Image: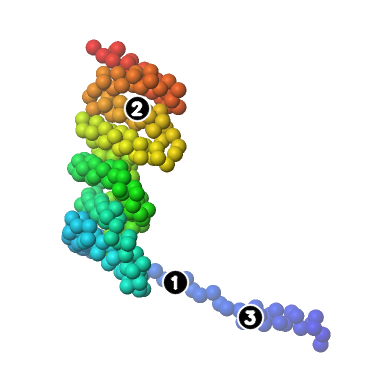
Amino acid sequence: MTLATLRPACAAVLLFTGAVPPAAAQDAPPVETAAALADLAALQEKHERSAEARRREAIALLRPAVQSGAAATRLYEDAVENQGQPDMTEWKKKNAELLRAKPFEAALQLRLRYLLLSLERGRAPEGAARWAAPSLQYAAELARLLTDKGFNAGPKEAREMLQTPLGEGPFVRWLRLGPLLPSGDLWEQVPGDLGGILEKNVRTPWRKDGDPRLDESWQLELTAGVALAEMRVGRGGRAIEDFNNYTAPSLLFRRARDRAAAGQPNRAATDLLDLARRHPAHPEFPAWAETLREMLGVKADAP
């Protein structure tokens, strides 16, 4: 018998001995809807109570560290150790100078203060206006530190501590606080982002209410911007000129719109006209002109 004559027989054997497809799996009995929903509601309530307990525990842990640079440093060491640092003795020895540096202590305290404020704010979308004033107070402290010459002359790790988002920092990772923090579209995530904090945390809720305190936030950002630009002069470049001719006019335009929204349309129109006269070459000039025309048109049509 040749190989050719064996092939059909082999194929038949293969077909016969092939695996038989399993029968379709049977589904479980239907879930009793009312009972399942009742269980789910109870479990959700338990989850929320657990999250609230964790939030209170974290606030109690963080609050003393906000009040003391030494306490903030100790908590930072705990966070590093609990994230798997294998040899804390060697790590402390290597970072001894950094851990004793006052600018680093100040950055740690401010970061912890912002984390504490964020935990108190929570994830609820309602009540944002309640946290605008505390955020403005924090922003004023942040501006003082950012414009402090000693802080800027200190170790770069101090500035990096403020520029790292909350969720990427040592305390949130260690304590697993991410799910308890406000979402990024409602709340600034970077403790050292002055403009972002003022815009998201302060102006957005106040803008909805036409709160006249909006002006305070703009004055703080403008004053801090001038101070930061002056500090950069020694490093070369055109920091002052760029701020005065580009950044500041952009901020003043946005301030004028907020003044109009807060019930000061005449003052806003005067601001915009002055801005247009002083900076006709600014890239945003077309937007200024369009906004001013709208303001003047509304004013002219008013009884």
Above or below 146: residue 69: below
Secondary structure of the residue carrying tag 3 is helix
Rounded to the nearest angstrom, the CA distance separating label 2 from label 1 is 66 Å
Residue assigned mark 1:
25
Instruction: Give the class, few, some or many, for how many residues have Cα within 10 Å of label 3's Cα (few <14, many ≥20).
Output: few
Q: Residue 279 is drawn in which quadrant?
A: top left
Front-most of residues 217 and 67 = 67
Residue assigned mark 3:
16
Q: Residue furthest bottom?
A: 1
Secondary structure of the residue carrying tag 2 is helix
Residue 141 image position (x, y, % from top left):
24, 45
- In the image, what residue occupies the spot 41% across and 71% down? 26
Above or below 165: residue 288: above
Q: Residue furthest right?
A: 2
Rounded to the nearest angstrom, the CA distance separating label 3 from label 1 is 24 Å
Q: Residue furthest front?
A: 234
Q: Is residue 94 left or right of residue 24?
A: left
Q: Is residue 197 visible?
A: no
Above or below 246: residue 274: above
- In the image, what residue occupies the spot 38% across and 23% down? 288
Residue assigned mark 2:
253
Q: Amino acid at mark 1?
A: Ala
Q: Is residue 32 left or right of residue 286?
A: left
